[in-house]
Image (cartoon, rainbow, N blue to C red):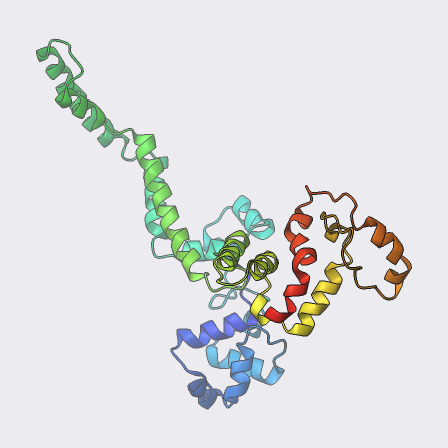
Amino acid sequence: MQPKLTIQERLKDLRVERGLTLEQLSAETGISKSALGKYEADDFKDISPFSMVELAKFYGVSTDYLLGLTEQKNHPNTEPDALHLGDDAIEVLRTGKFNHRLLSELICHKDFLRFMLDAEIYVDRIADMRVNDMNAVLEAVRQMALIKNGGEENDLYLRTLEVAQIREDEYFGSLIAADLKGILRDIREQHRPDTMTADETSLVATVQGQLQDAMNFEGSSEEKQVRSFLATFGIDYDKLTKEQFVSLIEILKLSKYLKSPINQRGKARPQLQHGKGKKNADKNEEDISGTVDMSSSFYSECVIWDCHIKALPQTV
């Protein structure tokens, strides 16, 4: 959630508040529909001074508000005394490092007044006397029933009279928490489309789904392994061109972890490398049957490239 509304959000909110379409706003202001649409787009960077002044006049707000220099749309000259806030509160609001926009939306929520009333009842102990009177009556009845029951407390009726007594701190704590949670849930839902809102689907869940799809693929075991490997990087195997596939293999061959653990003695000589790799060709041939760190997570994912590379181009 952005701490402040952007220029684009302010312009769109003002138009939506008046129930206007872009066509209607264009007719009222003389500004083209295409320009108005661009002004409200998330990626728009500039707006002409003429349009800014015209829109401010039409909406009855200051240009400072449209530019984000002030948050006061309808009360630009309100004195601090009119806000009924003390010096400490004003200082917190003025210098506080928190999201002032969130605070404003919380205060403007339809249930904020109820939240404040419940908080006041709890803080000023307004309901204490009523709660204590009710608890006293219930406890008196319980004591009378306890005497009749011969002092045996393990009774359904006696236990009911006991749990029916209200514990004020727990009750109002739950009530106030429910008020605040309901307000924040509504605000949270309103900001679901925001660019700063975190994605609901985690990266881990996405990768897990892609891996599962790859393993469920009906094809050769080699292709299934390749799909699983690419899925860990969020790469769609089916969208790879043959050129991209070959390039990817060449790059992966440069990794020291891609040397096969299988003894290559007596098998065909691997394809010679070019460039700097040619200088190390003899060394690479000696190393090809060397020891590989099998604990390497990268190797455990990539060894399939060295084992099955010859079969893969025909499947792309």
In this rendering, the answer to whether 122 lies above or below 225 is: above
User: Number of callouts in the render?
Assistant: 0
Place residue 277 in its image quadrant: bottom right
Residue at the extreme front:
266
The foreground one among 137 and 42 is 42
Rendering coords of residue 160 (x, y %): 17, 25
Location of the C terminus by quadrant is bottom right
Q: Residue at x 63, y 78 (%)?
A: 46
Q: Is residue 247 left or right of residue 282?
A: left
* Residue 316 shows in the view: no
Looking at this view, is 60 or 222 the one in front? 222
- Relative to 130, is 196 on the left or the right? right
Q: Is residue 37 visible?
A: yes
Q: Position of residue 62 (x, y in %)?
A: 54, 73
Is 296 placed left or right of 232 in the picture? Answer: right
Give how far across and how far down residue 242 sits, in percent: 66, 73
- Closest to the observer: 218 or 196? 218
Pick out the residue farthest to the right.
279
Tell which residue pokes out farthest to the left in this image. Answer: 148
The residue at 67%/68% (across/down) is: 245
At x 38%, y 47%, the residue is: 181
Q: Position of residue 222 (x, y in %)?
A: 59, 59
What residue is rendered at 52% in x and 83% in y? Answer: 36
Left or right of 21 in this view: 225: right
**Nearer to us in this view, 274 or 33:** 274
